[in-house]
Amino acid sequence: MHAMAWLLNQRSFFMGEVTEYQLRRHGKLSRDLRDPDPGNLALLPRETRDLVAETERFYRRLLRLDADWRQAPPHPPSALDALRWRLQRRA
């Protein structure tokens, strides 16, 4: 679910529905990725274990993409975004 939320936030940003500031503040990907219990994993069918492994690889890839993006300096807000922010602060 974290991955889906992150991807939807990214899409919203690229479609102009949220600002870069909003994405940086609220579009964080959870870093709490725990390894599955080997004993429980061994009880699952091979296809399911493969799916778990692929899902972990996918999530780690998203973590790398998110980390790389967050290392880039943020772009300054546009004049319109800055005006909206000032107006929201007054409300």
Image (tube, rainbow, N blue to C red):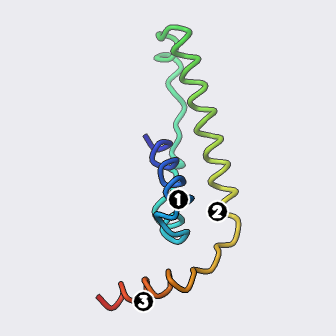
How far apart marks 1 and 3 lie (CA) works out to 23 Å
- The kind of secondary structure element at disc 1 is loop
**Foreground residue among 18 and 65:** 18
In the displayed orientation, state which residue is furthest to the bottom: 90
Which residue position is annotated with label 1?
15
Which residue position is annotated with label 2?
70
How far apart marks 2 and 1 lie (CA) works out to 19 Å
Residue 60 sits above or below residue 9 on the image:
above
Which numbered mark, 2 or 1, is in the foreground of this view? 1
First along the sequence among labels 1 and 3: 1
- The kind of secondary structure element at disc 2 is helix
Query: Callout 1, which amino acid?
Result: Met
Which residue position is annotated with label 3?
86
Which numbered mark, 3 or 2, is in the foreground of this view? 3
- The kind of secondary structure element at disc 3 is helix
- Label annotation for residue 88: none
Point out residue 55 in the picture as x, y percentages from the top left corner: 56, 29
Which residue is painted at 50% across and 17% down in the image?
41
Which residue is painted at 51% across and 57% down in the image?
28
Q: Is residue 91 left or right of residue 12?
A: left
Point out residue 81 in the picture as x, y percentages from the top left corner: 50, 80
